[in-house]
Amino acid sequence: QVQLVESGGGLVQAGGSLRLSCAASGRTFSSYIMAWFRQAPGKEREFVAAISRSGGTTRYAESVEGRFTISRTNAKNTMALQMNSLKPEDTAVYYCAADRDSGVVSPDRDRYDYWGQGTQVTVSS
């Protein structure tokens, strides 16, 4: 089992940047596919980005492609999401998630077994 803790959220103006971090417990972090999801008020939780076990493969939602970058450091059991050119529509609670079994870099939230508590990102116009 893995426990996930997000940090780095906050309030930023449109066009600004934030860097989210996800710290994972346990010794097997490198065996998990990792991802970021987000949920805005009144909306479904949606996929943002995912990264393979080695970090060599990434996948992004169309809405963040070219603005956000996902990365991981297995030696430190951490994952990050660098968010640039933020827009008001990026406002949401951001969650990190871990997929234990599938081995596929997927946007399907049902594949993910473990979730953090979330961190709020608010982008003002």
Image (cartoon, rainbow, N blue to C red):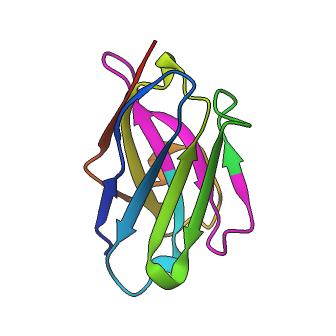
Of residues 52 and 14, the one drawn nearer to the viewer in this rendering:
14
Height in image: 28 above or below 99?
below
Q: Is residue 106 left or right of residue 20?
A: right
Q: Which residue is depicted at the point 60% across and 37% down?
A: 84
User: Residue 14, position in %: x, y?
Assistant: 51, 21
Q: Which residue is depicted at the point 62% across and 59% down?
A: 51
Of residues 16 and 72, the one drawn nearer to the viewer in this rendering:
16
Q: How many marks?
A: 0
Q: Is residue 29 left or right of residue 57?
A: left
Quadrant of the rendered image containing residue 114? bottom left
User: Residue 5, position in %: x, y?
Assistant: 29, 60
Q: Residue furthest left?
A: 117
Q: Residue furthest top?
A: 125
User: Residue 108, position in %: x, y?
Assistant: 55, 43
Q: Which residue is depicted at the point 67% across and 42% down?
A: 60
**Span highlighted in magenta in the image:** 36-58
Quadrant of the rendered image containing residue 112? bottom left
Q: Which residue is depicted at the point 60% across and 61% down?
A: 71
Quadrant of the rendered image containing residue 68? top right
Height in image: 112 above or below 49?
below
Of residues 115 and 21, the one drawn nearer to the viewer in this rendering:
21
Q: Is residue 104 left or right of residue 89?
A: right
Q: Is residue 90 magenta?
A: no
Q: Give the position of the N terminus as an image quadrant.
A: bottom left
User: Residue 115, position in %: x, y?
Assistant: 33, 54
